[in-house]
Every structure is written in C-alpha cells, then in structure tokens.
C-alpha cells in the first residue's frame, strides 16, 4: 500500500518517532471498508432505507406496483441526492452512485468499479427472496463461479453487495462460450445458435429428471433445428451434440444448476442476463429460479389485477 510504504520510509528517516504498523494497517482496512461497503454506516442500508421510504410514500398515496415501477428514475435521483449527503455525514468515501438497473422486484446500484448493491425494491418484500438466493448461489462451492460472487448482505437480505459483472448484450458474446464442432460457427452471432444451446440444455435436464415425455419433446425440437444449416448434417443427433458440450465446464455447470435449482433457461440464458466476471468467466446475472419468480409474479399480479 502506498500509504504504508510512505510511512515506512518516514520511519527509516526519522527513527526517533515510534511507528505503529498494526494501527496503520487497521486504518487502511477501515478506509477500504468505508470506500466499498461503509464501516460507520453501511452503503447498502443507506440506499435501501431511502428507496423504501419513498416506495412506502407512493404506496400510501395509492400508487399501484406498476406505477411505482414507472417512478424508478425519479426515485433514483432522490436516492442519489440523499445518499451523497448521508455518505458525507458518515465519512464514507465512495465514487459517484450509478443507476445500474431496475427489475420488477429489485433495484441495482453501483458506487464502485468492482461492486454493485442490489436492494429489495418491491412493496411486499419479494426482492428479499431473490437477494437470499443470489447470496446462497454466490458462495456455493459447486456453482459459485457461474454466478456473481456476493461479499456482504443484510441479515434479512434487504440488500446484498455483489461482484460487478460486465453485461453481455449480444448473442455472439454468449455463444462464444459454447463452441461445438457439430454446429456451424458462422451462426455464433444468431439467436438460432443460442436457442439450440438452451434446447440441448433443457433436453439434458429432462433426461436427468427421467421425464421421457419432455425428453422426446426437446428431441423433436432438435429435429426441427436440423432443417436449418446450423447443424452440419442430418445424421447428427442431439446426444452427439451433448457429448461435445459435456466437455465444456460452462455447459455442464449450468445444466446441473438448472436441474438442482429450477432455473428457467429462457429467462436466465439470454443477452442482458449473462455477463463476464472480473476474472473472465461466464456469469448468470439473475438466476431466475422458477419458484421464486412465480411467487413474485403472484404477489405482483394480486396487487395489479
């Protein structure tokens, strides 16, 4: 650390002054925590409290959940203004707060190049379940590397601090992680290639479940795909494609995660929901676990008949 080196040099030059190395390291650690997460006042808590206060205000005025969603940009500017004031008063050093997105149940903010803060931005707490799942997947030893890593979280999962991932917005950016010698590479930049990757994944998942009806369904879908020139020849079977994909760690882990957690492939594996982690690995931004999504949708639909 630059500060430590400067102070060490000062110690060498001014030997009469006592230098407390441990205290300096503790100071540096506290400054780092304040920058990224907030030691004296947690950044996630600040953002969550401001956001939820405004949500509840709108709710009390008769706003529907859909209308509240439409107010996100205005709420963000309020959050940003109040965050800057509170961060300053609590001596939190952070870069400018950025609006990184808003879904039906959560809002995402960035105040550092390496981390994002996801908060429950629902009026009924639906975002809490998603934050909990993100945290559990982000520290999962078996699947953690295909999901954003989570570094801190509220005890009740009102907010989490997660790895900042570079979002992939095109088909080729995803498809390049799933090369297969039986699929023509010049289709890499197309929806058809990604559709086929997901189809093969779903076939494999249903095979793992022992669901013969759905296995046949996805096999028939693959037969339809073979009518295009994506597949090298009509003799290629879906099993042969899987045999090549199984050598791909991304394919194997994603299929296993879909099977174990009930992830919806069409929602999860698409441009805008896939990204590249800080270390270059492929990451699913939002796991789209079916049971949680359905619960959230039910709550949302009940409030917006």
Image: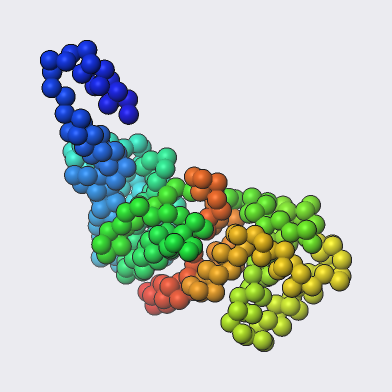
Asked if one can make out residue 235 in the rendered structure from this viewpoint, the answer is yes
In the rendering, at what x and y percent does residue 246 appear? Answer: 66, 65
In the rendering, at what x and y percent does residue 271 appear? Answer: 60, 55
In the rendering, at what x and y percent does residue 88 appear? Answer: 22, 37
Taking 113 as reference, is 135 above or below it? below
Between 193 and 215, the one nearer to me in the picture: 215
Taking 229 as reference, is 96 above or below it? above
Between 102 and 187, the one nearer to me in the picture: 187
Taking 213 as reference, is 44 above or below it? above
Could you tell me which residue is drawn at 19 percent across and 40 percent down? 90
Q: Quadrant of residue 187?
A: bottom right
In the rendering, at what x and y percent does residue 194 appear? Answer: 68, 61
Q: Quadrant of the N terminus?
A: top left
Seen in the image, is 80 located left or right of residue 236?
A: left
Q: Quadrant of the C terminus?
A: bottom left
Q: Quadrant of residue 184?
A: bottom right
Seen in the image, is 216 located left or right of residue 276?
A: right
Asked if one can make out residue 27 in the rendered structure from this viewpoint, the answer is no
Could you tell me which residue is drawn at 32 percent across and 68 percent down? 125
């Amino acid at each position: 650390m630059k500060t430590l080196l400067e102070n060490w040099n000062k110690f060498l030059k001014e030997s009469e002054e006592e230098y407390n190395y441990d205290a300096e390291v503790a100071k540096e650690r506290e400054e780092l925590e304040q920058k990224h997460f907030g030691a004296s006042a947690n950044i996630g808590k600040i953002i969550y409290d401001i956001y939820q206060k405004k949500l509840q205000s709108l709710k009390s005025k008769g706003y529907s959940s859909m209308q509240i969603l439409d107010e996100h940009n205005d709420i963000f500017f309020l959050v940003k203004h109040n965050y800057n004031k509170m961060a300053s008063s609590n001596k939190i050093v952070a870069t400018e707060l950025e609006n990184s997105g808003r879904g039906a149940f959560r809002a995402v903010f960035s105040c550092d190049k390496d981390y994002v803060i996801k908060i429950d931005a629902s009026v009924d707490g639906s975002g809490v379940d998603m934050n909990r799942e993100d945290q559990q997947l982000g520290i999962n030893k078996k699947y953690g590397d295909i999901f954003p890593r989570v570094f801190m979280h509220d005890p009740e999962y009102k907010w989490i601090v997660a790895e900042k991932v570079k979002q992939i917005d095109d088909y080729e950016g995803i498809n390049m992680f799933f090369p297969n010698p039986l699929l023509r590479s010049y289709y890499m930049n197309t929806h058809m290639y990604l559709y086929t990757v997901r189809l093969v994944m779903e076939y494999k998942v249903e095979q793992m479940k022992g669901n013969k009806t759905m296995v046949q369904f996805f096999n028939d879908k693959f037969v339809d795909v073979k009518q295009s020139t994506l597949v090298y020849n009509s003799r290629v079977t879906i099993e042969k494609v899987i045999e090549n994909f199984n050598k791909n760690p991304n394919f194997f882990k994603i299929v296993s995660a879909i099977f174990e957690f009930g992830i919806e492939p069409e929602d999860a594996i698409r441009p805008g929901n896939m990204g590249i982690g800080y270390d270059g690995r492929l990451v699913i931004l939002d796991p789209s676990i079916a049971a949680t999504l359905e619960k959230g949708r039910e709550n949302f639909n009940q409030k917006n008949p």
